[in-house]
């Protein structure tokens, strides 16, 4: 019966040949391709994924040639059915009635037949499903290229290799038929290369395509080892996926450009030219750069000289802008901000600046903070920032420094866009922290007020990042600023912040979600206080008494809710029953005002005993009310640090 | 050495051999070759088209009085439209670089993601900036939408920056030093243009007059668009092309006003919307006007 002995196992190769895919999308696309392939549920041993800008490749080993045969039991007529019906069923299954079995089921005895379903060829299954797999890969922005009605992909698909063992898995996407022809490097390789599963990688290598990203990365790093390249993993990753045959080359620039701020030089090299910076003596910038080209060598120096000229022109521009900008001080540029739009509905940057100055003062900022807020956006009118927008803030800070602003002020301007991500640091000084808060809060309040609220993945004004930045600054700079009064007049903004606070403490700080819910239920306007309470709850959780007590609090809350208890009065001791009820009352009086940490061990047995022995729902209305009051007092006593009923207990 | 005009001749020849109509520059001021009717209107609808032309492109705000070695008020684009885009369009493009003497086995070519967008035209596409030894030499775009209309057939648009490309090939650090012919440099031909237009655009353009002109062109385009009747039997006679010229005028005047610093914060977005509305209006009417052609193609 077992077909396994005869099953043939085959290797599989899929190469989707495209025009140049944006480098940053490639790793995610590969992971997506893996998931889609695994969803096909074809048995296999291993999956390997590779990519260059022009190909996404999946290789897998050990696919069976066919699916295993399977059996399916078909239920026929009841044993009591007339013989014609039985004969009819047998005929339908292609056998004589003698071949049928009789089986007893809960409904009685029935004829059955075990049908053999032959397994399908894996090649057929792949041919059927691969178009869906390929076109199912998720990309952030897709295009169509054959016609509006045609398929969408990240860039046009130009060839497809699909081989199962020796055979082509036949299918077609956008007029491209799968085959066994790959394609080499655009200019150093052949346009068409016949490949097999076995020689695929070597054939590509012969045609100047290094398939493995890891190998391309290592090649770059190995070949630049004589130069002191400043590490830049994300730029390296970009270049690994921008090339099929990467080779680093070092170039140089005139040392006189080193008079420009390092920030400017690095930005030009990194963001505009994708060059690595080189460290000289004492970690300073050396007048050198490393570019990564997509060919193996540059014997005549064409590529090096070309890149050097481009960089010289760029640096000349930057120097020209730097010098021009110095002719007008930042302080003299404030009024020019009237001509720079912040947002159509929210007016100009001049208006924003005025709001920020006011807000900086409200947030407790001193004269320096207000001054920094006043100058913070002025660099938007400089030529250097118009050219290198990613240097906004930094350029303002550098100009403020050369123009004699105090250290807190220039550093605040320099830093006020921070943190630009959750990994980024917060502004280095208090002045910068206040200005950064004023900037972000103003953007958030303004945008929410005019209905520019992020939805799903659409967040054109980066409001999530702004709110996340506010949270991070408040907590990490330990600023005891009440957040609610600043955002409370907009319920959507408050809800938005609530999510950001939760995200920060859960995903960045690693608190459990129920601890966060519990602590936030007791308020989250002061985030420094919230952090302290969260730390306490996290600590308390180690106590063996904590979860049972939390469960009791949940019970208390339920009881109070069911009784629709709204009593504000105090407990009447004369109505207390001696024993567990009175004991709990006395314990609660003793621990009043004490931190929960020291009370928890003594309180828990009293609460347990109370629930064990005392009926809250006493027949006498006064007694019942008194008991509810006791529970309510207890609950309120501890709910200033958290609502413990939010804690998820294991019981 | 290849002169500026040699390079233009060779590129035109190359694309002519690949079935392109070689057009002359459009005679209304534009900010980019894309805005010419040869691109903006021809990419609409199902009819195949292939065209190449050099288009002087005016960007008033980029003027630098002839002082900056790389920045020009008016630069020359070689605009190529291949509709539909052939499967080997990138190979053809690389071939054009080889036709002007660039040995691509010895130079570094990279295609870096850059999706082009022109809000005033309601147009966008997917593509790359093509980098040659670190220098951006071409914008390569698969058009997806134009005049707010999803395109039925996807054209490839290649836009070469001719001054940059020539400076690269002639190894010149300033575009003004490139040889237009063996006898004349780019400076000889263009310097006064750059100087005088910078003075006009930044200093002397009369703002009130420009606004008046803007309003006049806008009103004329709008009047025509309003008069267009899709049900009319002889709608092919209707002057949509002249209407579009008025839109181009609006766009250029807007750019001049912007360079002059005359467009306030609140106005800016609104003015872009006004131009866009006209451009989209022309595109839609044009699609309708061409619709009998759809039937012809089908037959």
Image (cartoon, helix red, strand yellow):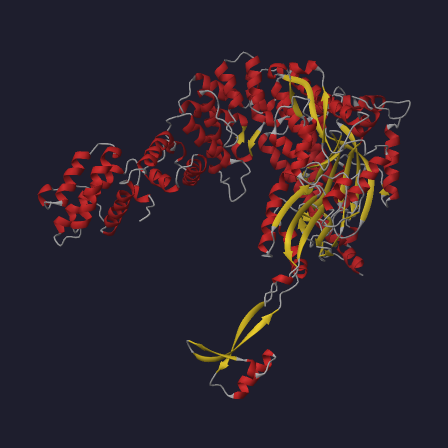
Q: Is residue B261 visible?
A: no
Q: Is residue B146 above or below residue A231?
A: below
* Residue that sits furthest to the top in the current view: A404
- Horizontally, residue B54 falls left or right of residue A572, namely right
Q: Is residue A506 above or below residue A408?
A: below
Which of the 4 image quarters holds residue A491? top left
Give the residue drawn at x 72%, y 16%.
Answer: A254
Displayed quadrant of residue B25: top right
Q: Camera-side residue: B207 or B44?
A: B44
Q: Nearest the camera: A178 or B40?
A: A178
Q: Is residue A489 left or right of residue A8?
A: left
Q: Position of residue B266 (x, y in %)?
A: 57, 32
In the picture, residue A382 is in which quadrant? top right
Q: Position of residue A56 (x, y in %)?
A: 67, 45
Left or right: where B192 falls relative to A540: right
Whole-percent x and y of residue A131?
67, 55
């Amino acid at each position: 019966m077992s077909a396994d002995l005869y099953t043939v196992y085959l290797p599989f190769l899929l190469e989707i040949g495209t025009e140049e895919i944006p480098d940053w999308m490639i790793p995610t696309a590969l992971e997506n391709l893996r998931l889609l392939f695994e969803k096909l549920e074809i048995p296999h041993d291993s999956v390997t994924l590779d990519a260059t800008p022009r190909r996404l490749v999946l290789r897998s080993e050990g696919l069976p040639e066919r699916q295993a045969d399977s059996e399916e039991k078909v239920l026929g007529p009841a044993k009591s059915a007339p013989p014609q019906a039985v004969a009819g069923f047998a005929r339908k299954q292609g056998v004589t009635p003698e071949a049928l079995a009789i089986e007893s089921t809960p409904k009685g005895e029935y004829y059955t037949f075990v049908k053999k379903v032959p397994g399908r060829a894996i090649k057929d299954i792949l041919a059927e499903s691969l178009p869906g797999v390929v076109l199912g890969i998720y990309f952030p922005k897709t295009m169509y290229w054959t016609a509006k009605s045609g398929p969408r992909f990240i860039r046009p698909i130009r060839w497809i290799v699909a081989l199962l063992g020796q055979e082509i898995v036949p299918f077609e996407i956008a007029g491209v038929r799968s085959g066994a022809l790959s394609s080499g490097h655009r200019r150093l390789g052949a346009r068409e290369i016949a490949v097999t599963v076995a020689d695929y990688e070597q054939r590509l290598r012969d045609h100047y395509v290094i398939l493995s990203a890891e190998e391309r990365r290592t090649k770059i790093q190995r070949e630049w080892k004589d130069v002191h390249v400043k590490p830049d993993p994300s730029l390296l990753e970009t270049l690994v996926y921008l090339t099929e045959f990467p080779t680093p080359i070092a170039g140089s620039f005139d040392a006189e450009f080193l008079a420009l701020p390092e920030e400017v030089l690095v930005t030009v090299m990194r963001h505009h030219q994708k060059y690595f910076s080189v460290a000289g003596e004492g970690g300073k910038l050396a007048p050198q750069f490393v570019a990564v080209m997509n060919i193996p060598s540059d014997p005549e120096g064409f590529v090096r000289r070309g890149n050097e000229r481009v960089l010289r022109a760029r640096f000349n521009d930057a120097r020209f802008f730097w010098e021009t900008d110095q002719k007008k001080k930042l302080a003299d540029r404030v009024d020019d901000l009237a001509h720079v739009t912040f947002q159509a509905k929210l007016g100009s940057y001049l208006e924003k600046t005025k709001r920020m100055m006011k807000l900086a003062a409200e947030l407790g900022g001193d004269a320096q903070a207000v001054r920094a807020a006043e100058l913070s956006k002025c660099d938007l009118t400089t030529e250097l920032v118009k050219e290198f927008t990613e240097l906004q803030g930094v350029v303002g800070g550098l100009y403020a420094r050369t123009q004699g602003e105090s250290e807190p002020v220039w550093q605040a301007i320099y830093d006020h866009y921070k943190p630009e991500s959750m990994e980024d640091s917060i502004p280095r000084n208090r002045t910068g922290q206040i200005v950064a808060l004023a900037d972000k809060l103003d953007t958030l309040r303004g945008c929410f007020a005019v209905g520019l609220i992020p939805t799903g993945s659409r967040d054109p004004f980066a409001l999530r990042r702004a709110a996340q930045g506010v949270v991070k600054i408040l907590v990490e700079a330990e600023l005891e600023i009440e957040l609610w009064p600043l955002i409370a007049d907009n319920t959507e903004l408050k809800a938005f912040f609530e999510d950001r606070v939760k995200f920060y403490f859960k995903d960045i700080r690693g608190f459990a979600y129920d601890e966060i819910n519990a602590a936030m239920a007791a308020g989250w306007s002061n985030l420094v206080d919230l952090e302290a309470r969260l730390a306490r709850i996290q600590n308390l959780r180690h106590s063996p008494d904590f979860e049972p007590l939390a469960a009791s609090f949940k019970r208390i809350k339920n009881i109070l809710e069911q009784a629709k208890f709204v009593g504000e009065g105090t407990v009447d001791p004369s109505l207390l029953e001696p024993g567990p009820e009175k004991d709990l009352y006395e314990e609660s009086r003793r621990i009043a005002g004490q931190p929960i940490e020291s009370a928890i061990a003594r309180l828990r047995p009293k609460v347990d005993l109370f629930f064990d022995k005392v009926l809250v729902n006493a027949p006498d209305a006064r007694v019942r009310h008194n008991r509810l009051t006791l529970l309510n007092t207890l609950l309120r006593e501890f709910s200033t640090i958290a609502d413990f009923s939010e804690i998820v207990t294991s019981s | 050495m290849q002169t500026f005009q040699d390079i233009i001749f060779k590129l035109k020849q190359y694309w002519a051999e690949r079935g392109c109509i070689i057009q002359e520059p459009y005679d209304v001021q534009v900010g980019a070759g894309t805005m010419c009717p040869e691109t903006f209107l021809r990419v609409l609808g199902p009819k195949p088209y292939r065209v190449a032309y050099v288009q002087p492109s005016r960007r008033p705000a980029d003027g630098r009085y002839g002082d900056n070695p790389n920045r020009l008020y008016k630069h020359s684009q070689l605009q190529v439209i291949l509709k539909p885009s052939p499967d080997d369009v990138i190979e053809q493009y690389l071939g054009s670089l080889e036709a002007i003497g660039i040995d691509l086995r010895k130079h570094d070519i990279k295609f870096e993601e850059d999706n082009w967008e022109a809000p005033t035209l309601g147009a966008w596409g997917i593509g790359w900036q093509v980098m040659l030894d670190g220098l951006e030499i071409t914008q390569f775009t698969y058009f997806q939408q134009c005049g707010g209309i999803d395109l039925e057939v996807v054209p490839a648009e290649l836009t070469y920056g001719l001054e940059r490309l020539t400076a690269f090939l002639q190894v010149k650090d300033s575009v003004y030093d490139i040889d237009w012919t063996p006898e004349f440099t780019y400076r000889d031909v263009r310097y006064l243009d750059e100087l005088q237009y910078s003075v006009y655009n930044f200093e002397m353009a009369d703002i009130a007059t420009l606004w008046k002109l803007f309003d006049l062109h806008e009103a004329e385009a709008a009047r025509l668009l309003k008069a267009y009747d899709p049900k009319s039997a002889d709608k092919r006679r209707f002057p949509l092309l002249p209407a579009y010229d008025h839109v181009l005028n609006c766009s250029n005047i807007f750019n001049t006003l912007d360079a002059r610093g005359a467009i306030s914060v609140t106005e800016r977005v609104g003015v872009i919307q006004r131009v866009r509305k006209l451009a989209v209006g022309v595109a839609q009417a044009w699609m309708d006007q061409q619709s009998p052609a759809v039937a012809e193609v089908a037959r």
